[in-house]
Image (cartoon, rainbow, N blue to C red):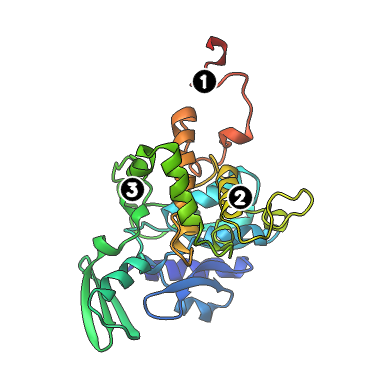
Amino acid sequence: MAIQEQLKKMILDVLPDVDCVIGWGPGPDPLRGSPFFMRKPEDVESFMAGPMAVQNPALFLPEYKGKKVGVVVKGCDSRSVVQLISEDLIKREEVVIIGFPCDGVLDVAKVENALASHGEPGEITAVEFSGGEVKVTLAGNTHSLKFDDVKADKCGRCAVPNAVMSDFFAGIAREASGVKDDYEDLAALEKMSLEERFAFWENEMSRCLRCYACRNACPMCVCRDHCVASSRIPHWISQADSTRDKLMFQVIHAVHLAGRCTGCGECQRVCPVGIPVLLLKRTLSKGVTELFDYAAGMDTESKPPLLTFQVEEATIKERNW
């Protein structure tokens, strides 16, 4: 039985015991899926997984705290669920986790860039995945793209293709690739001087619309009602269209996620102007990994280093200074 059919059966089995099951369903066009909330058996027919299961459904779980809810997750999504549980932002007994092995997800921006090279604007009428290729029908013509060329960057460094935690698991767990994140995407930034790096971020942030899509898409950014972006007491950031204020918000956002970010990449994926905001989070994640040997979202019993206290950290010998 195909994984999608297994998942549908599992969702139907779980549905009577939960308020809803969160997964993925049809989006605005064949190239895009969207978060999907299944409450009735007939809803399950529209469920879809695979390369179109792009969004992180863990985002919605804190809104259901106090209710029982099901969630379908791939590896990176499950890390967010685990992290939310470890920080007591959701209760383990209130979440039914349905996992599956992931072979990577589509990067819509890469597909659109590839199609733009053909000079064929128009409505996308069909998308098909087979044999490592993505076949996109546009303006009556079908274009074949290699899936490896248009999958999300995070998939190339993924070491967690299966759900870290699950109550039900569809398909056969994939063998871990053994890929080690070498933070290659940070290399160019780290080679810059401080002045060059600051100029880089000022240039990027000059395009920011302050739409806060990055914040709203982050499953670990749960203090939206008390966000520094809208707080007036204390007044951290003004509403002026200032590049410095935009950068200030992004730096605060990244610091709040230090040791908590699971690298799902939703913040960058949803940015309407293509600002590489994930680089800020990954810079801090790299530091946390090197200093504390900690990876977010791998264990419900462990706490992020910056949410705990030890007299002396194993890798930071203050007494020797």
Q: CA distance from mark 2 to mark 1?
A: 33 Å
**Which residue is labeled 3 in the image?**
157
Foreground label between 1 and 3: 1
Q: Secondary structure at mark 1?
A: loop
Residue 157 percent across, percent down from the top left: 33, 48
| Along the line of sight, the residue nearer the viewer: 160 or 6 | 160
Residue assigned mark 2: 92
Q: Residue at x 55, y 67 (%)?
A: 21
Q: Residues within 10 Å of mark 3 (few under 14, many from 20)?
A: some
Check disc 2: other Cα within 10 Å, few if <14, some if 14-19, many if 20+: some
Q: Is residue 164 above or below residue 266?
A: above
Q: Quadrant of the C terminus?
A: top right
Q: Splitting the image into 4 quarters, where does residue 192 fall?
A: top left
- State the residue at coordinates (37%, 69%): 108
Dot label at residue 55:
none
Q: Residue at x 74, y 54 (%)?
A: 231
Q: Identity of the amino acid at label 1? A: Ile
Label of residue 316 in the image = 1
User: Looking at this view, is 229 or 297 the one in front?
Assistant: 229
Amino acid under label 3?
A: Arg
Q: CA distance from mark 1 to mark 3?
A: 28 Å
Q: Is residue 91 visible?
A: yes
Q: Is residue 217 left or right of residue 223?
A: left
Q: Secondary structure at mark 3?
A: loop
Residue sitting farthest toward the top:
320
Q: CA distance from mark 3 to mark 2?
A: 28 Å
